Image (cartoon, rainbow, N blue to C red):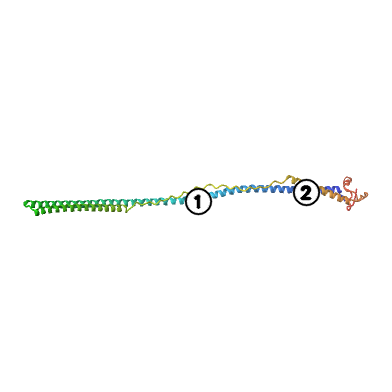
Amino acid sequence: MIVISPLVAGLATGGLQAGLGLFGATAKRNAQQQQYLNDLAFQNANNRFSIWQAGFSAKVQDANKQYEFWKETFNYNQQRAYSNSQRNVELLRAADQAKVVGETRAAAGASFVQDSQALSDQLREAEMASAVAQQQYTWRALSARASVQAMNMEGNSVDRIVNNYAFQLGDQLALKAIESDIRERQYTRSQAGQVAEYLSQWNSQTLYQEQQVFDPIAPFAPLPTMLTPPPPSRTGAPPSNAAFAMDIGSALLGGVNQGFSTFQGMQALKTPSSSTGPGTGSPFGSTFGQMFGDYSGLGGGN
């Protein structure tokens, strides 16, 4: 039967424990490194996506602003066309009213000229008739005085008759002068009335006051949307080499500790070796027999 010495068992268990520790530390290191690479790749992808999303959002907002600008421009053109049509309507109204005003004032002027001419002709005819009547009355008075004087009669009665004709002629001249003044004043009042009527007709139609039509305000072109930078992000530091070295050291120390524990445990169970005899020797010869000692519970010895 093969007997394992405590040293070999300690080295075997210690090596196995150290190997498992090194394998665990290496696997942990690889897992941390892979996690770091995954986090770094995710951060880069997230940053690129944030930049793309910011640019895409800006493009969408620019498109919406451009659409709103086109819509406002269309409404502006419609309002401007309406304003121009209203301005044309006001211009046509002003032209029509100016035509009416011109015709009214022309008719007022013609009526004033005709009425004034009629008043002048009426006054002239009245003055001419008064002058003719005065001349005839004067001629008759002189004729009557001459007839009385031709009778070669003297005395107070004849003088009274002559003086009476002269007095009547003076009265007649005074009355004609008063009538002439009255006609002139009447003519002046009539002319003033004609002027007032002419002004009334002149001002009966006034020019059309055009309504002020304001043009709409043109829309402002939209400004480009500013890109919003993505928030800062960080992945963290890569796996620490010091931590990996500590894990390696811990694995080695664990292996050494396990080896010593196994060696000490097997030393405590070791018994004195018996004499060499049949059935107690090592089948591998004396060389391997030197490497193994007697182990209590297994039997055999060197």
Q: Nearer the viewer, mark 2 or mark 1?
A: 1
Q: Residue at x 73, y 49 (%)?
A: 28
Observer-nearest residue: 32 or 111? 111
Q: How many dots with numbers? A: 2
Residue 152 in the image: state x and y as whole percent.
Answer: 6, 51
Observer-nearest residue: 165 or 99? 165
Residue 254 in the image: state x and y as whole percent.
Answer: 80, 48
Residue under circle 1? Answer: 68
| Label 1 SS | helix
| Label 2 SS | helix
Observer-nearest residue: 287 or 40? 40
Residue 49 in the image: state x and y as whole percent.
Answer: 61, 48
Q: Is residue 109 left or right of residue 262?
A: left
Mark yes or no: residue 96 visible.
Answer: no
Q: Residue at x 12, y 52 (%)?
A: 163
Q: Is residue 92 left or right of residue 49?
A: left
Observer-nearest residue: 94 or 186? 186
Q: Residue at x 50, y 51 (%)?
A: 68
Q: Are marks 2 and 1 in contact (CB under 8 Å)?
A: no
Q: CA distance from mark 2 to mark 1?
A: 68 Å
Residue 262 in the image: state x and y as whole percent.
Answer: 84, 50
Amino acid beneath label 2: Gly
Q: Earlier in the sequence, mark 2 or mark 1?
A: 2
Amino acid beneath label 1: Glu
Q: Residues within 10 Å of mark 1 (few under 14, many from 20)?
A: some
Q: Residue at x 52, y 50 (%)?
A: 65
- Hey, which residue is sitting farthest front in the picture? 156
Q: Is residue 39 left or right of residue 80?
A: right
Mark yes or no: residue 101 visible.
Answer: yes
As drawn, the label of residue 23 is none
Residue under circle 2? Answer: 21
Q: Residues within 10 Å of mark 2 (few under 14, many from 20)?
A: many
